[in-house]
Each structure stands twice: as C-alpha cells, then as structure tokens.
C-alpha cells in the first residue's frame, strides 16, 4: 500500500496565529479519507498547502510520493481538486470553461480535448447542458461543473473541499455514488468536510482537525468498533439491572448499556429472567461522539477571557 | 463516554511529541532567515524564498537607479591648453560643421509684451533646439515643442521660418539689427559671441567636464567692467573642434546660472544640404517679414544723436544702424539704447513696474531680471527710450541721466 | 498557456466593450470638427488635430493623440489590473494554479495577453481613425503630407511613420500595463490594482509639470509618451523615442521581476 498524502510537522503561521500547527497527515492509496474539522480549524489552509497554493511555514508535504510544493508541476496534474466551492468564467459556457481549464495544464492533446470535456460533463450529469453561460447555472450545476473540472484528467487523487455544498438531497446521493464509483476504479479520495454524516457514509479513514492540530486520525471501522458492551432496549430497565447484577453501566430511559460483547448471551439471560426485550445490539460509538470527544469547543466561539 | 479507549493503540492523538516539534519550527523562524539544520531541506518557507527574490528586485532597482550617476561619474579628461588658445579655437569654430540637439534653460522672466513674447520665452523657458550647421550662412535651427516646432532655415540671403501649428512659412531679410533668435541661444553661437571681445586678462581655465559625451575644457570669463551685471561666464569647449559645448552665464547669484545652455547630443559631421534647405510646402501660408518695429521707430528720430559714451561705456560703431539707436560697451557688458514707440512703452513700463525689485524715480522705471537690466526712460513731451543690457541698475540710472534729449547734463 | 490567455482575453465581452468606448471619443471629436469646422488653435489641443482638416489621412495620429493621455492608459490599467486579481476575485486563480500552471508561466502569459490587448486596441483606434479621417475629411492620398518640420512626405513615408507611431504608442502603454500587473499580484481586488496603476500615472503626469521634480523627470513613466510626434519631424528625432523605448523596457523589466518575486512566493488564499 503506497502513501498518497503524507505531511510531517506541517505548520502555517499568519503573523502570530498558527492556522495549522504541526500536523502529520497520512492518506493511503485506495482510501476515502474524511478530513473533519469545524469551520476555521485549518482544513482549508491544509488543503491549499497540499495543492501548493499556500506555502507552509515549516514542515514537509509529500504528494503522490513527491515533495510539494517543489514538485507541483510533475504531480498536480495527477490530482483533481475542488477547493472551497467551484469558480468559473461566468460569461462562458460550462463546456468552454472546462476546455480552457484543460488547455491550461500540461499534457492532454487538444485533439482529444472535447472528448475529455464531454466525458467529464457526462460523469457529473451535465451531459446535455448546452451553450448556456455559467452565470445562468444554478448553485448545484456549478458544483457539478466544478467536480467535472476536477475529473477532467482522470486523476489518481481527488482532493475535494465540501463537494456537496449547494446540492439537493438527490444531488448529494448522486455525488456519493460517483465518488464510490471512482473509488472502485482505484481513485483515492481526500474529502474535507464539516458534515459528519457525509463522512460517516463515505469514508474509510478519518482525520479530525481542531484548532490547527490533528487530534485524531484512524480507520473509521476502528473508531466506531464495538465497545464491548451491548445495548438493550427494554420497557423495564430496573428489571434489567436486577437480572444482570453489576453488569449494567448506564441507563438512559428505555436504553440500557450492559457490559458484554455477546448480545445472544445477554438476551438469553434477560429472557430467562423474564425481562421484556424490544431490541438488542452491540454498542458502537457514533462518529459524532468520537469527534466531539477528541475536539474541543467550536473555534467560532469567542468566549470572554478571564 | 465509550469509545475513547477502543483502538487506542492506533489513534494518533496530538500530544506532547508534536508540541516539541512545533516549538522547534517556531524557534527556527524566530531566528531569522536561517532555519535549523534539521529542517533546512524540508522547509519551503515563503519568508526565505521571498526574501531572496525581493533581494533580486532590490538589486535590479539599485543597479538601474545607479546607472545614470555611474555614467555621470565618468571623469572628463583635461588638456593643457592655455586660455587664450582656447578662445582662439572657439572663435575659429564657426566653420566647423555639426548637427546636434541642445537645451537652454533661462531663469530670466522678462516682462512680457505681446510683440516681444517670443523673445521673452527664449530666455525664461527651457528651450529644446535641433541644429544643423553647415556654416554661418547655411544652417537650420528647430525649436522643438511637444506638439510642433518652429524651424528657422538660414541661407545666403535671408531666413525661412516655418511654424508647424499655423502652417506658416515666413521669409525674413537680413537686417542690421535682429531680435535674439533661437540660434543665438545655442552654446556654439552664444559662446563665440561672448568670447569674441574678451581680453586675455579676463580669461582663465577651470578644468573640464563631460558635456554631450565629450570632454569640455572649461574657460571662465570674468568681466572687469564696473557696469557689468554679469559676474562670470563659464564656457565648456570641445577640445578637438573648438565648438563650445555649454555656456553658463552668472549674474549676481554665483551659485545658479541665469542662463545655461548646452548640447545634449553633438555630432561633428557635416549635415547634408537637403536638411538645411527649405521650400514652403504645398498648402502653407507664405508671409514676408515686415522687420522689427524698434528699427522703424529709431529711423524717425531726429535732433541730436546719442552721445559717444554712456555710463562709462563706449558707443560701438555699427554699420547701418539708425542714428537714434545705440549700442554701448564691449564683450559681455553691453547696453542698448532704443527709442520705443509709445504703445510698446506703455506696456513695457507697466510690466516692468510690476516686476520684483523695480525702482521708480524721476528718471523712469528700471528693474533687473537676473543679469539683464531693463529701463524705460520716459518724460512727458520727450521721446521714450528703452535701455537694456547686461548692466547693473546703477549703470542704467547713470546712462539715463546722461541722455541729452531728456534734459540730462550735457 | 499564452493561447489560453489570449482566448480568455478576446472572448471576453468586456474587452471589446472597452475598445468600443475607446474609439467613441475620436469619432465624436471628428464629428464635432466636421460640424463646427473649428480647428484647435495652434499650440493647443492634441497634436495633429489642427492638421487633420487639411489632410484626413493624419486622423489616425490625431485619434491616438486624443486617447493617449487618459483613455488609453485607463483601458490598459483596467485590463492589466484585472489580469491576476480578477482571477483571484473570481476564484479561478486557485484552479489554474492547481491545474497546475506554473506561477511564472501564468504571469508571462498574462503579460503577453495584456500586450496583445494594447496592440489590438491601438491598431483598432488607428484603423477607425483612418476610416473616419478619410471619409469625413479631405484626404490627400496622392500628394502625401507635410512633416512637422515643413518638408513634404510621400504617402509611403507617411504610412511607414504612422506604423512606427502605432508601435511606439503601444510600447508606451507597457509601463502602465506592468504597474497594473504588479499591483494585480499584490491584491485580490482588480479595482485596487487598476487604481494603483492610475495613481502612478496621475502622480507621474503631475510631477512632470513640476519644476522641482525636474531631476527625476527623465525617469517618469509618462515622460516620453508624446515623443511619437518626433517621428513626424524631418529628419526623425530619435533621441526621445529611443529613450522612451528604453524607459518602458526598464519599467516592464523591473516590475515584472517584482511581480514574479511577489507572486511566486505568495499564499493564494482567494
């Protein structure tokens, strides 16, 4: 397994503020990496540093095995990016926009350009968009067009910053399917988002950024692995406590947490004791709980200093 | 909360280790442009690269800004030529053919009358001139303005003056007295004229300087006449050809020249005859010059002529001058006495009276503009005269008092 | 990349709107001249305008002289000021750089596109001037014309010198373009970059008229703008022309290096 993105000790300072404060990212080939963090936690700055737009104050970045930003010219054309929302020339049509963008980079013969553009538009569901100028596009269409721009050169790595912004629920699900499709074909996806649900549904690995620091980075499956307890839904929590003396760790209404990683065993004992059981499941922490535990208060909050 | 413990072996929680790491980075940055040795290859610090790149910019700017003064600092090489020989070389240079571009800057804001406006402009402004010189009777001087030009072509029998903006060609005959023309401001012509009557005792050498890319040998003329308002004249002469390259005339203020004229470019090669020749182009207005009003007025003067000396200056014998008009003095100390038509006098007196430092008394109105003295002598019933020249105010007053027609002492 | 920038420049409606507006002033002046038959007095008004009434073939020059002091530099400053800052403001800059387009390459491509704009603009102004001049005024295509020095020029000489003048005016605009381009890398606001370049121009024009500033006058970017008149003297006065070309070259060189130093080390956060 090769590393696609690796940073070590990455720092970006603006004046006295450390926007990014020494982070060590590791994204493996084949990952769908969810880069989580509240607004202002340094996500966008990190993404921009990965793409060579913002130059780090110190630290190293390796992108597809090469040192950034020095190797940007060799590496970046293998990367597709959507950074902080799409941006286009409003007076030109979507097709012309993509054609210009395609012509700007190296490689990519002009003979096959229109074919590439058409394929990218098709992929994002804008195949029949016609000659309308982009300024007449809806927010969702622009988002799709931005995604098409990122897909133009069939990149090995997709760096997407909030890719579902402005999309309706159908659009969001379409994009999700598209990303999963691309992932199946071998594309690594680096997805920066503040939407936990989106990340939870898509990603295989998760990194959590809080105030410029990477406070958590692990496989999603590990983070949300069973905790070793079982959740019992019952209308009579008191009898559960009585039946499983000492194994009950907490009771929240009709939801009782019981130590023990074998629901069948718990069920047998409860049924034996005549406790009414409505449901049983292995306890798994939600991603939200994990993130909240790792990160502190939202950096948007400005509390009174004492 | 559950979950924190699970998989704790793999969870990377930012901790102490990184704190140390960033502290290091911070130190290296605070230390200036030299990052610590461990990170030197890894850091692509914008601060570092930017500093180096801006240094390139600063170096380039400094180089370009310094270039003119570097070129200006090329020393001129002096030659051991005695002052008298240098003067002779200048006087003999009027047959040296050349073409060039000259600039004259005068600090002389002459009181302007409509009729003499073009003359006043010559002395008060910065004038740019192109010149093609094949000889004293075959040359061309263009006064270059941003949007046009006035060119004066001299041939054996007269001058053609072309004014572009009015598309007018004017043919002028050669007269005994001519108003100052652009030609007279050229360093070559002005230098020759000012040195023509200088005594050897008034001349000294003053080193050399580079003018128009040539070595100009310095020659200083300090007039001995008491009446002179010119304190000194510095002429910088091309050592090879004797053509004056720069002329600076100083009045009382010895630091800033009242008149400074110099070549910016000079090429010592004869220009082709087609350059100096002129024929009015199709569609141009062609005029004949009527001559100068001043001469007309002087021709009407009757009665006793002007005295042989005024203010200690001798009258110059000049062929063809009307008797009512006199030029006194020698070299750079000159006084002209001109009977003025009444209309011109009124205008001139008003302008003169308004200039700073003007003296008004029973003799008339007088003022000095740089080294140039100007006076209007006007009594009711008598004829008005204009006295002007490179003389002091006292000399003007003395001359006015000696004028016979005005009731001065005979 | 250069082709891409040229495509962007000339596919943009604003580019052509600017050129159209630029041409309206000389056309208006020509109409007024024909209607009123009042030529500017000698020494006043733009160069060559008084000569146009007798020879319409000179109108391209008069048109250039009309737009040179203000309209043309403003148009150039607007376009050049927009070059990088406009992309930054629209957000397309980050996509271009991530495409990737080398920052130095982008800068050079932008400069070339601005150059092309200047050249096209000047040529269009001259061409429209020629059409206007020859249809509305008496043209003397056979007799040639009169130089500023009062000598006769053949039609070939006139057209040759007009071409030189067009080239010189275009080069004169490069300094403005370089200033605007440099400011355009400093800010994300195209308007700010344009205003910065115009401020430099206004300051330069002001200092040029000030005696106290005469020591620095030869280095002011607007110093030699009117020197294209010198091409119509006979013989041609090359001194100010060559100096004007060299000065513009120096400004372009220095500002381009400064723009490079700034842009290649800048964080793109737009």
Image (cartoon, coloured by chain):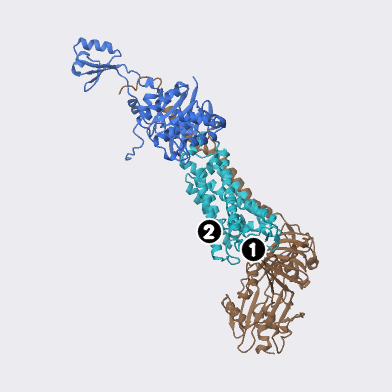
Res. B406 image quadrant = bottom right
- Of the numbered discs in the image, which one, if any, rests on residue B148? 1
Q: Are the residues flagged by discs 2 and 1 in contact, CB closer than 8 Å?
A: no
The tint of chain C in the picture is cyan
Q: Residue B224 location in percent, x, y?
A: 72, 75
Distance from disc 2 to disc 1, alpha carbons, whole Å, reads 24 Å
User: Residue C97 versus residue B326: which sits nearer the camera?
Assistant: C97
Say which of B378 and C83 sits in front. C83
Give the residue number, with chain letter if any, for mark 2.
Answer: C28
Chain B drawn in what color?
Answer: brown
Question: Where's the C terminus of chain A, which quadrant?
Answer: top left
Give the structural element (helix, strand or loop) at label 1: strand
Residue B118 image point, x, y percent: 64, 71
At x 58%, y 43%, the residue is: C112
Residue B189, image x, y percentages: 74, 68
Position of residue B272 relative to residue C90, above or below, is below
Whether residue B21 appears in this view of the structure is no
Residues at marks 2 and 1 on the same chain? no
**Disc 2, SS:** helix
**Is A247 located above or below residue B141 in the figure?**
above
The part of the image, by quadrant, that contains residue B306 is bottom right
Q: Judge the density around disc 1: few (<14), some (14-19), many (≥20) Cα neighbours within 10 Å.
A: many
Output the chain of dot 2.
C
Q: Chain ID for label 1?
A: B
Q: Chain A: give its colour.
A: blue
Q: Which residue does the image show at 68% across and 55% down from the upper left?
A: B72
Does B16 appear above or below B349?
A: above
Query: Comparing marks 2 and 1, which lies closer to the viewer?
Result: 2
């Amino acid at each position: 397994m090769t590393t696609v993105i690796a940073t070590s000790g990455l720092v970006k300072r603006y004046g006295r503020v450390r926007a990014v404060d020494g982070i060590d990212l590791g994204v493996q080939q084949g990952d769908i990496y969810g880069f989580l963090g509240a607004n202002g936690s340094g996500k966008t700055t990190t993404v921009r540093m990965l793409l060579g737009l913002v130059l780090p104050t110190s630290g190293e970045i390796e992108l597809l095995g090469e040192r950034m930003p020095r190797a940007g010219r060799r590496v970046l054309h293998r990367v597709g990016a959507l950074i902080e929302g799409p941006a286009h020339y409003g007076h030109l049509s979507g097709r012309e926009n993509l054609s210009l963008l395609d012509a700007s980079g190296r490689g990519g013969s002009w003979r096959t350009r229109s074919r590439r553009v058409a394929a990218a538009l098709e992929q994002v569901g804008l195949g029949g968009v016609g000659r309308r100028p982009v300024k007449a596009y809806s927010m969702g269409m622009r988002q799709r067009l931005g995604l098409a721009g990122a897909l133009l050169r069939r990149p090995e790595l997709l760096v997407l910053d909030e890719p579902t912004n402005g999309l309706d629920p159908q659009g969001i699900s379409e994009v999700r399917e598209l990303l999963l499709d691309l992932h199946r074909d071998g594309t690594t996806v680096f997805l920066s988002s503040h939407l936990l649900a989106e990340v939870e549904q898509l990603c295989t690995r998760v990194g959590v950024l809080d105030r410029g620091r990477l406070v958590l980075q692990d496989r999603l499956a590990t983070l949300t692995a069973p905790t070793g307890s079982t959740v019992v839904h019952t209308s009579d929590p008191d009898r559960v406590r009585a039946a499983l003396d000492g194994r009950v760790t907490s009771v929240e209404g009709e939801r009782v947490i019981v130590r023990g990683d074998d629901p069948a065993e718990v069920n047998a004992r409860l049924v034996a004791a005549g406790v009414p059981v409505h449901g049983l499941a292995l306890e798994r922490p939600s991603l939200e709980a994990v993130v909240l535990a790792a990160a502190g208060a939202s950096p948007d909050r400005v509390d009174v200093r004492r | 909360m559950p979950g924190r413990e699970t998989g704790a072996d793999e969870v990377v929680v930012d901790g102490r280790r990184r704190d140390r790491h960033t502290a290091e980075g911070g130190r290296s940055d605070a230390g200036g442009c030299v990052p610590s040795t461990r990170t030197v290859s890894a850091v692509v610090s914008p601060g570092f690269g930017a500093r180096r790149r801006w240094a390139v910019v600063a170096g380039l700017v400094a180089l370009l800004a310094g270039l003119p003064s570097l070129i200006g600092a090329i020393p001129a090489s002096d030659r051991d030529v005695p002052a008298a020989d240098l003067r002779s070389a200048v006087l003999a240079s009027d047959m040296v053919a050349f073409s060039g571009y000259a600039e004259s800057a005068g600090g002389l804001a002459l009181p302007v009358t409509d009729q003499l406006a073009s003359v006043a402009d010559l002395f008060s402004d910065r004038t740019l001139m192109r010149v093609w010189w094949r000889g004293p009777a075959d040359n061309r001087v263009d006064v270059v303005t941003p949007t046009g030009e006035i060119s004066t072509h001299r041939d054996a029998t007269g001058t053609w003056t072309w004014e572009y903006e009015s598309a007018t060609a004017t043919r002028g005959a050669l007269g005994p007295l001519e108003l100052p023309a652009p030609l007279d401001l050229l360093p070559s012509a002005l230098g020759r004229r000012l040195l023509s009557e200088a005594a050897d005792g008034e001349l000294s050498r003053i080193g050399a300087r580079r003018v128009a890319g040539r070595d100009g040998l310095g020659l200083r003329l300090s007039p001995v006449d008491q009446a002179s308002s010119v304190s000194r004249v510095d002429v910088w002469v091309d050592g090879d050809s004797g053509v004056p390259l720069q002329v600076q005339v100083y009045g009382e203020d010895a630091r800033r020249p009242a008149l400074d004229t110099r070549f910016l470019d000079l090429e010592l090669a004869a220009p082709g005859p087609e350059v100096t020749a002129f024929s009015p182009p199709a569609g141009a207005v062609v005029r004949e010059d009527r001559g100068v009003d001043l001469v007309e007025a002087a021709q009407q003067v009757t009665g006793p002529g002007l005295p042989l000396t005024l203010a200690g200056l001798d009258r110059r014998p000049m062929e063809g001058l009307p008797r009512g008009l006199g030029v006194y003095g020698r070299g750079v100390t000159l006084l002209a006495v001109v009977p003025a038509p009444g209309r011109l006098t009124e205008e001139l007196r008003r302008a003169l009276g308004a200039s700073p430092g003007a003296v008004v008394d029973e003799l008339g109105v007088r003022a000095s503009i740089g080294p140039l003295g100007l006076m209007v002598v006007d009594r009711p019933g008598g004829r008005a005269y204009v006295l002007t020249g490179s003389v002091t105010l006292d000399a003007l007053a003395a001359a006015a008092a000696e004028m016979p027609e005005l009731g001065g002492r005979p | 990349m250069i082709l891409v920038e040229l495509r962007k420049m000339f596919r943009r409606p604003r580019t052509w709107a600017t050129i159209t507006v630029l041409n309206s002033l000389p056309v208006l002046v020509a109409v007024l001249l024909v209607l009123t038959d009042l030529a500017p007095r000698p020494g006043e008004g733009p160069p060559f305008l008084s000569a146009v009434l007798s020879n319409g073939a000179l109108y391209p020059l008069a048109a250039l002289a009309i737009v040179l002091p203000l309209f043309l530099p403003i148009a150039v400053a607007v376009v050049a000021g927009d070059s990088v800052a406009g992309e930054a403001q629209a957000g397309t800059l980050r996509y271009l750089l991530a495409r990737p387009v080398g920052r130095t390459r982008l800068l050079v491509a932008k400069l070339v596109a601005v150059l092309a704009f200047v050249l096209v603009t000047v040529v269009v102004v001259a061409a429209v001037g020629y059409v206007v001049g020859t249809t509305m005024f008496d043209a003397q295509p056979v007799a040639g014309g009169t130089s500023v020095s009062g000598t006769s020029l053949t039609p070939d000489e006139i057209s040759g010198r007009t071409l030189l003048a067009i080239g010189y005016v275009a080069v004169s605009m490069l300094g403005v373009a370089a200033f605007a381009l440099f400011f355009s890398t400093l800010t994300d606001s195209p308007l700010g970059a344009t205003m910065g370049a115009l401020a430099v121009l206004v300051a330069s024009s002001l200092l040029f008229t000030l005696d106290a500033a005469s020591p620095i006058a030869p280095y002011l970017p607007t110093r030699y703008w009117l020197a294209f008149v010198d091409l119509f003297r006979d013989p041609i006065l090359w001194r100010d022309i060559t100096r004007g070309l060299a000065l513009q070259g120096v400004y372009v060189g220095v500002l381009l290096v400064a723009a490079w130093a700034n842009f290649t080390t800048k964080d793109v956060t737009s």
